[in-house]
Image (spheres, grey):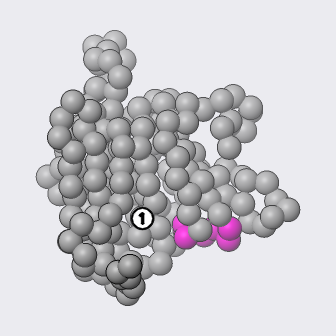
Amino acid sequence: LAANEGGAAFAGMGIDGTYDIAGAAGPCIATANFSGEPVTVMCRSSARRPFLHRESALGLRERTLAWVKFGLRFFDADLDGDDDLVVASGGLTDDEPITGIPRRQPLEIFAADGDRMYDASREALGPLAGRGLLGRAVAVIDADLDGAPDLIVTDNGGRALLLRNRSAPRGHFLALRL
């Protein structure tokens, strides 16, 4: 899970797993990696098969190469049964004049659509989509107890952000109070 098809190690700065990603028949694990490395998504179709790379098939490989990715989480934003993916990124040093990559980087949300994922950041995040962060960690909670998953994102050196999910859910949820 920690290497590309050629055996080279990825940075592996954030990790999460799911069973409900587009087109997968078994468990999947996503890893947030350094710039120049994609978000990797590896899925397994059965207990006897190895985990195989799916980031290209999902449409994530090229779109996730640029940023220094730290936190990521699968979550079903619209309760349609397929998990979406949120990725928090932010540079380590201010070397933008050399690399051309800004230190403050965008929060991204990739929504499931059939067997692929598309960048839903603009529609999901509104004005926050254009704002760069020093994103580090992501947590999924239901802050307002409405059944729709909300996000908490840390901005290194800044305040944590609570992003409330205001989308119209298409499915159902079960809430338990223990």
Nearer to the camera, 58 or 134: 134
Residue 6 at what x, y percent from top left? 74, 33
Which type of secondary structure does the marked residue at label 1 adopt?
Answer: strand
Q: Residue at x 31, y 38 (%)?
A: 135
Q: Residue at x 68, y 67 (%)?
A: 26
Disc 1 crowd, CA 10 A, few/some/many (<14, 14-19, 20+): many
Residue 32 at what x, y percent from top left? 49, 41
Where residue 90 sits, quadrant-wise, is top left
The quadrant in which the C terminus is found is: bottom left
Residue 87 visible in rendering? yes
Nearer to the camera, 87 or 114: 87
Q: Residue at x 36, y 54 (%)?
A: 139
Q: Residue furthest front?
A: 178
Relative height, residue 9 to residue 170 (above, below): above
Q: Going by the image, does 94 lie left or right of 178?
A: left
Q: Residue furthest top?
A: 98
Q: Residue at x 65, y 29 (%)?
A: 9
Nearer to the camera, 175 or 88: 175
Nearer to the camera, 57 or 175: 175
Q: Which residue is mark 1?
A: 75
The residue type indicated by label 1 comes to: Phe
Q: Going by the image, does 4 lie left or right of 95?
A: right
Magenta segment's dominant SS is: loop
Relative height, residue 39 to residue 117 (above, below): above
Residue 23 shown in magenta: yes
The quadrant in which the N terminus is found is: top right
Q: Residue furthest left?
A: 127
Residue 41 at what x, y percent from top left? 59, 51
**What span is in magenta?**
20-26
Where residue 165 sits, quadrant-wise, is bottom left
